[in-house]
Image (cartoon, helix red, strand yellow):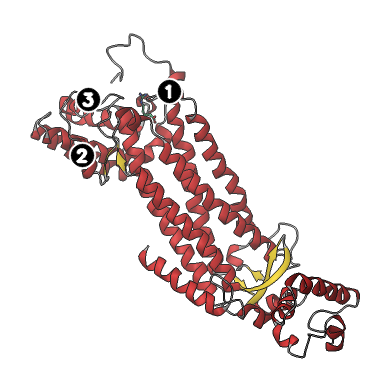
Amino acid sequence: MQYFSGRFKEAASELILDFHSSIHFDQRLYRYDIMGSIAHVRGLSKMEIISKEDGCLIEKTLLEILEDIENGKITFSTTYEDIHMNIEKILIDRIGDVGKKLHTGRSRNDQVAVDMRLFTKDEVKKIQSYLIELIEVTTNLGKEHLETYMPGFTHLQKAQPISFGHYMFAYSEMFKRDFIRLNNAFELLDYSPLGCAALAGTTYPIDRKFTAHTLGFKGPTLNSLDGVSDRDYLIEIMSALSIVMMHLSRFSEEIIIYTSNDFGYIELSDAFSTGSSIMPQKKNPDAAELVRGKTGRVYGDLMALLTTMKGIPLAYNKDMQEDKEVFFDAVDTVKGCLQVFVGMVKTLKVKNEVLLLACNDGFINATDVADYLTVRGMSFREAYKITGEIVSYCIDNGLNLETLPLEKYREFSYIFNGDIYETIAIKNCVEKRKSLGGPSKESLLSHLERLNEFLDGA
Ligand code: ARG
């Protein structure tokens, strides 16, 4: 079949066929294309635009084509540019003139738009299910370490003590927001453009609400120009995916730092590490590095589509075919990274003793010394200054806040008493921080309840 037969006298050049063709990447939309066509054909026969018999034959044949594609019996051809033309061509080859009725009141512009939305809805659900798995992993790991104390950092300098549970729950919150962000984007995209046709709707008495509901959408899009040229939802999903990657990348960075020889806070399982081709001692966190690296790639996918869309006049323009490769790449990359992360975090070993030992240098309980004085009547700024002097004295004399003798403390302020040591014990420093969202076991247990509620409802 010469696709554009009628208007064209010359056949397309091989070069241009190849240039236009998207079949090598859009063939993964075949199932959605067939679903869209079936909804369309049901709508046509419901409104008696085509006969019931023709409608049934088209639907039955489309289902057979679907089965044949799934069983690898069909090879697509670049002669037919994209998945939409390929499937229509196969249909016409199988049932002749009846097949030619499928495209009544429809254009590839609304066809591709509906296919992409259906694809996106499924992919978002898959990505959300991986996010849930990851939230379960960080939450469960955190739950095992509610009292595993470790230094918390600002500027990558030891700051105040927290627990590994507190640290893990921070990631549970980030991934929870990622999940919600995808839900929000899903809400906006869940409308069907089918029936917008090329740009101006159609003269046939189609029932767009019927086709939208048949396909599981909340309803039809409300403007046909917008319906065929809207790619906001892809941009929004890729933006949400970029944020997922940003979170995974920060987590990766910490895994890389915390597994390094100088930290040794955690250890990755051998199954999620790699060796060196020359250095026999090496155990490298390559997977985390690769996730960190792939983050740039997903940002690139987002920027590519934003840039493609920025100068396109309404309605459809061929530029928009460029949405697919970047979007496919973004969803595939994120799915891969999330799966790797689930396995990597689930199997990592937390070095409790190393973490506790790391709390002993860096004066991470200095704020608690200042609070000790403040609670006993000194202004916080005064207490801050005195504590700074104490820290400086300790550094000069090779001491820390635990080993500084009481007489010395009292030279800085007579307020200090023997109970200072109990007050600044790391466990007490953490457990006193009972403020909402804080690291104490009490705070974490109520956070855990909220996380479980979220997971139960997700
Ligand atoms: N392959 C095209 C795409 O992905 C389908 C829509 C083509 N429409 C057109 N008027 N050329 O965008």
Q: CA distance from mark 2 to mark 3?
A: 14 Å
Check the image and report above or below for 319 versus 388: above
Q: Which mark is residue 209?
A: 2
- Front in this rendered view, residue 196 or 275: 196
Q: Residues within 10 Å of mark 1 (few under 14, many from 20)?
A: few
Q: Is mark 1 within 8 Å of ligand 1?
A: no
Left or right? Give the position of 117 relative to 154: left
- Front in this rendered view, residue 288 or 65: 288
Q: Quadrant of the C terminus?
A: bottom left
Identify the residue shown where x is 44% and y is 56%: 179
Residue 188 picture location, percent across and down: 36, 44
Residue under label 1, please give it: 313
Q: Earlier in the sequence, mark 2 or mark 3?
A: 3
Q: Secondary structure at mark 3?
A: loop
Q: CA distance from mark 1 to mark 3?
A: 21 Å
Identify the residue shown where x is 50% and y is 70%: 139
Q: Which mark is residue 410?
A: none
Identify the residue shown where x is 54% and y is 73%: 142
Ligand 1 quarter of the rendering: top left
- Front in this rendered view, residue 406 or 378: 378
Q: Amino acid at mark 2?
A: Lys
Residue 452 picture location, percent across and down: 42, 71
Q: Amino acid at mark 3?
A: Thr
Q: Earlier in the sequence, mark 2 or mark 1?
A: 2
Q: Secondary structure at mark 1?
A: loop
Asked if marks 2 and 3 touch (Cβ < 8 Å), the reply is no
Inspect this view and state whether residue 73 appears: no
